[in-house]
Image (cartoon, rainbow, N blue to C red):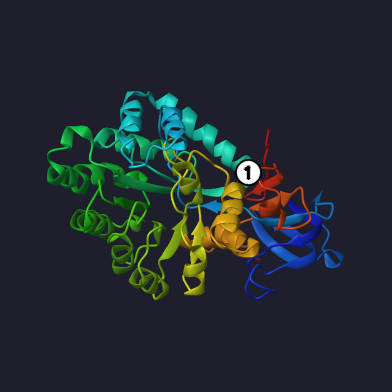
């Protein structure tokens, strides 16, 4: 059985073979078969289909690809957020608060949070999401976090090196040994990626390189939390190790920008974190003008960016980071796919996965033009219309 999405006023394909950076098609239709795109063209030329969805002249775009999220946690840090809004500086130290709550939670409690936030993201158009561990920080709890994350996504990331837990505060080398050994082995059945928070107060260059190198040798792809709180070695290490993405990229030197521009490492920007911590926003314009591939993601987590909304991040990127609406939409779809090294999502063309978002708006411009408005009218994931209630 096939499905035709018809009467599309503006179709964003991200297909470079079509017009402009977004590969726009006007007065379009999309044919879906077996969860994949089978045909794209003018609505007037659309083939017959078993079922039809009338977009009624609205805009349609690929499902958002959120390539950086931390959904496996327990507890709440709303009081910490309130303190920052009245002047307290963000340091990342609150992660240990979430670690304590997460360790104490049952599997069902963690599962309930993950599934709730995944549904919340889907209602806002996110069809592909990456989920990290990092709030367990023990062999058992990191493996548990990844196992639960795997229930809702194949894009799972081992982040045992989020911070050094309290019980290893005076023995960071011993903790790195644990991450590189028993913890990594326990995580491998459930993880596709390895990540490290390379930052002051977390992990230095030597520890970061050691963890990522061991993870890479075990078959995991590399991601890096880099240069969020200040200048540091994270971006350079990401490029050196061929990481798929360097995430945050808030404080960059000219050498960092040049390194990213000369590599295949994507700069994943997380404006929800800057919004929630009153920190300076990354300079996306500088990166784009240098030729760096940029992605947008939510960084959804309970401490520094408790949002699952990619449309919100698009609006922030346009307002605060120097991106055009088209650049921000591309970064939230095709850019996120690049950051996950995926070619089947973030784009609409024959053979790609049939992940489509229908807006209650005539153009992609409205995602930034009407911030905070629930513009997601309908979502198809693997060609199946989703229940958004």
Residue at 64%, 40% (x, y): give it.
Answer: 123
The quarter holding residue 30 reads: bottom right
**Residue located beneath label 1 in the image:** 124
Residue 103 in sight:
yes
- Residue 170, percent from left and from top: 12, 38
Q: In the image, is 203 to the left or to the right of 262?
A: left
Residue found farthest to the right: 44
Percent of width and height locating residue 368? 66, 53
Query: Extreme front residue here?
Result: 87
The residue closer to the viewer here, 134 or 112, is 134
Q: Is residue 8 left or right of residue 257?
A: right
Q: Reply above or below: 27 against 200.
A: below
Q: Position of residue 219 (x, y in %)?
A: 30, 57
Front residue (pair 29, 302): 302
Let me know if residue 346 appears in the view: no
In the image, is residue 308 above or below residue 217? above
Left or right of 238 on screen, residue 250 = right
The residue at 39%/76% (across/down) is 262
């Amino acid at each position: 059985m096939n499905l035709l999405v018809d009467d599309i006023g503006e179709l964003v394909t991200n297909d470079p073979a079509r017009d402009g950076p977004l590969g726009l098609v006007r007065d379009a239709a999309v044919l879906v078969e077996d969860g994949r795109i089978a045909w794209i063209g003018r609505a007037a030329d659309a083939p017959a289909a078993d079922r039809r969805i009338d977009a009624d002249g609205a805009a349609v775009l690929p499902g958002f690809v959120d390539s950086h999220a931390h959904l496996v946690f327990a507890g709440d840090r709303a009081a910490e957020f309130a303190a920052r809004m009245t002047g307290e500086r963000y340091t990342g130290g609150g992660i240990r608060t979430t670690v304590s709550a997460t360790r104490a939670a049952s599997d069902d409690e963690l599962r309930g949070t993950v599934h709730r936030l995944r549904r919340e993201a889907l209602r806002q158009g996110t069809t592909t999401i990456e989920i990290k561990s990092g709030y367990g920080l023990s062999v058992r709890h990191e493996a548990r976090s990844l196992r639960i994350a795997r229930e809702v996504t194949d894009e799972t990331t081992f982040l045992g090196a989020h911070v050094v837990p309290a019980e290893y505060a005076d023995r960071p080398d011993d903790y790195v040994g644990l991450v590189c050994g028993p913890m990594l082995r326990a995580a491998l059945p459930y993880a596709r990626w390895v990540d490290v928070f390379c930052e002051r107060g977390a992990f230095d260059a030597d520890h970061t390189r050691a963890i990522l190198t061991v993870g890479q040798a075990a078959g995991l792809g590399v991601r890096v939390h880099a240069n969020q709180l200040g200048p540091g070695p994270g971006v350079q290490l990401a490029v050196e190790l061929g990481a798929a993405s360097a995430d945050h990229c808030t404080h960059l030197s000219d050498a960092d920008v040049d390194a990213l521009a000369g590599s295949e490492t994507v700069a994943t920007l997380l404006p929800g974190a800057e919004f929630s911590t009153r920190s300076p926003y990354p300079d996306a314009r500088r990166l784009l003008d240098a030729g760096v591939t940029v992605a947008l993601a939510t960084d959804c987590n309970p401490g520094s960016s408790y949002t699952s909304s990619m449309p919100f991040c698009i609006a922030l990127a346009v307002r605060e980071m120097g991106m055009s609406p088209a650049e921000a939409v591309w970064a939230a779809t095709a850019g996120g796919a690049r950051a996950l090294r995926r070619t089947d999502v973030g784009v609409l063309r024959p053979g790609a996965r049939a992940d489509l978002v229908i807006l209650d708006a005539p153009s992609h411009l409205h995602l930034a033009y009407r911030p905070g408005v629930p513009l997601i009218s309908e979502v198809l994931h693997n060609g199946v219309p989703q229940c958004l209630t």
